[in-house]
């Protein structure tokens, strides 16, 4: 029996299968024209989330062609001022989600990064569009970007962190700063000439000084000032943690004293301001804010959690064993451990083993809380910069 008819038949079946697959792909491709219709605004987020399905199993030229089509369509929507803001925002989010290749992790679409940077830096871009672009830029930083774009992205993120917002936009711009810090954490580099590390230190010191200014104020803080304190602590703590995500092992000429000073100054400033504002009704907030700060400082020093060992790329590991800075950081670490233990177990003389399934409650009173915060601040003040 000749194999030729069998082979020809097999080829025909494969051809039909491939044609059907291509037809199905064409039929299920996203309909971007519908995105612009105002009545479809609520459906757009779901449509955006389904875009990755259109690229399932697509590789090579077919994937590149579809990526180019989708990229062009999404750009057109996000650039169109006549389109609803929510739809433009979802369009630029979708741009940031485009992938050249699937995988774990996937490969971000390089052309999208250039567009995201352009939108973010354009003066006329509305804030909501800028934030969508920033989220995409951070995703590229997480997944990996070309070395030729790295310095540009670092500068963009650092500018966001350091830019002072208008009072009316303060809350919104804090989201930008926190998101930019996520991007710097992902890039993990101290930057050319340690620029990233230096700018983060500037941010921490600026926030610490603001906290000190409020602490020295004679009158009680207003509601707005207390809200400002919360934002200052959140931003400074995130900047401190970001330092812990950077690679100090490969860095050179790091100003170890300046970093150590900043960690100590921030911890003292938070203890002082929380001691000033602590009342019976603010116990939970005080504990949360001090823990956020101190645990972030530990991460900044050691590149990990309070209970873990310093990572090999951490700031602490980069110091000589007998260096003055390492000794000062050991003092700071001991004070933070004592603070954390107090929050969990109360005063040392009154500590008892918690019973199984016992309800969570604070094991200290307001006087004891004030006392432990004052003691921590005083202990750090007793170890001045060398």
Image (cartoon, rainbow, N blue to C red):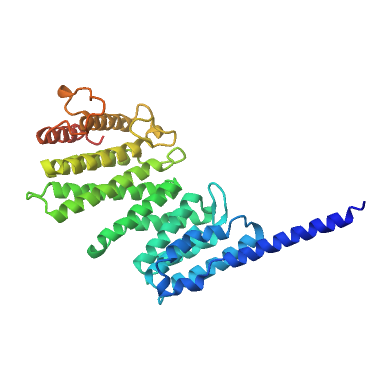
Residue 80 occupies quadrant: bottom left
Which residue sits furthest right?
Answer: 1
Residue at x 22%, y 29% (from the top left corner) = 358
- 71 left or right, relative to 271: right
Above or below residue 130? Residue 141 is above
Name the spot of residue 245 as percent of width and height, x first. 40, 42
Name the spot of residue 236 as percent of width and height, x first. 28, 47
Residue 336 occupies quadrant: top left
Residue in front for this viewpoint, 95 or 268: 95
Of the 4 image quadrants, the one containing the C terminus is top left
Q: Is residue 194 visible?
A: yes
Name the spot of residue 77 as percent of width and height, x first. 46, 71
Residue at x 39%, y 56% (from the top left corner) = 157
Which residue sits furthest bottom?
Answer: 82
Name the spot of residue 149 as percent of width and height, x first. 50, 57
Above or below residue 306? Residue 101 is below
Residue in front for this viewpoint, 345 or 192: 345
Above or below residue 148? Residue 248 is above
Residue at x 39%, y 72% (from the top left corner) = 84
- 178 left or right, relative to 346: right
- 311 left or right, relative to 55: left
């Amino acid at each position: 029996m000749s194999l030729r008819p069998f082979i020809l038949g097999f080829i025909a079946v494969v051809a039909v299968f491939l044609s059907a697959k291509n037809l199905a792909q064409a039929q299920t491709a996203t309909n971007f024209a519908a995105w612009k219709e105002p009545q479809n605004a609520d459906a757009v987020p779901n449509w955006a989330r389904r875009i990755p399905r259109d690229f399932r199993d697509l590789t090579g030229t077919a994937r590149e062609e579809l990526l180019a089509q989708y990229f062009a369509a999404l750009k057109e929507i996000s650039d169109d001022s006549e389109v609803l803001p929510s739809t433009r925002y979802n369009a630029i989010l979708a741009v940031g989600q485009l992938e050249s290749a699937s995988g774990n992790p996937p490969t971000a679409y390089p052309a999208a990064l250039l567009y995201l940077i352009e939108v973010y830096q354009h003066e006329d871009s509305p804030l909501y569009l800028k934030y969508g672009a920033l989220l995409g830029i951070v995703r590229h930083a997480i997944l990996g970007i070309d070395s030729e774009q790295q310095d540009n992205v670092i500068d963009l993120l650092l500018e966001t962190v350091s830019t002072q917002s208008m009072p009316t936009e303060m809350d919104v711009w804090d989201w930008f700063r926190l998101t930019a810090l996520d991007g710097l954490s992902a890039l993990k580099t101290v930057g050319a000439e340690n620029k990233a590390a230096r700018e983060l230190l500037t941010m921490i010191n600026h926030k610490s000084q603001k906290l000190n200014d409020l602490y020295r104020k004679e009158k009680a803080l207003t509601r707005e000032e207390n809200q400002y304190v919360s934002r200052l602590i959140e931003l400074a703590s995130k900047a401190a943690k970001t330092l812990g995500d950077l690679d100090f092992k490969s860095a050179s000429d790091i100003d170890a004293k300046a970093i150590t000073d900043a960690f100590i100054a921030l911890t003292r400033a938070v203890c002082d301001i929380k001691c000033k504002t602590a009342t019976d009704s603010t116990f939970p907030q005080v504990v949360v804010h001090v823990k956020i700060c101190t645990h972030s400082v530990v991460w900044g020093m050691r590149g990990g959690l309070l209970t873990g060992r310093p990572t090999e790329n951490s700031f602490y590991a980069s110091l000589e064993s007998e260096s003055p800075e390492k000794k000062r950081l050991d003092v700071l670490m001991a004070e933070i451990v004592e603070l954390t233990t107090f929050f969990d177990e109360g005063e040392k003389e009154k500590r008892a083993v918690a019973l199984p399934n016992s309800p969570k409650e604070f094991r200290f009173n307001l006087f004891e809380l004030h006392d432990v915060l004052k003691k921590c601040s005083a202990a750090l003040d007793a170890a001045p910069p060398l």
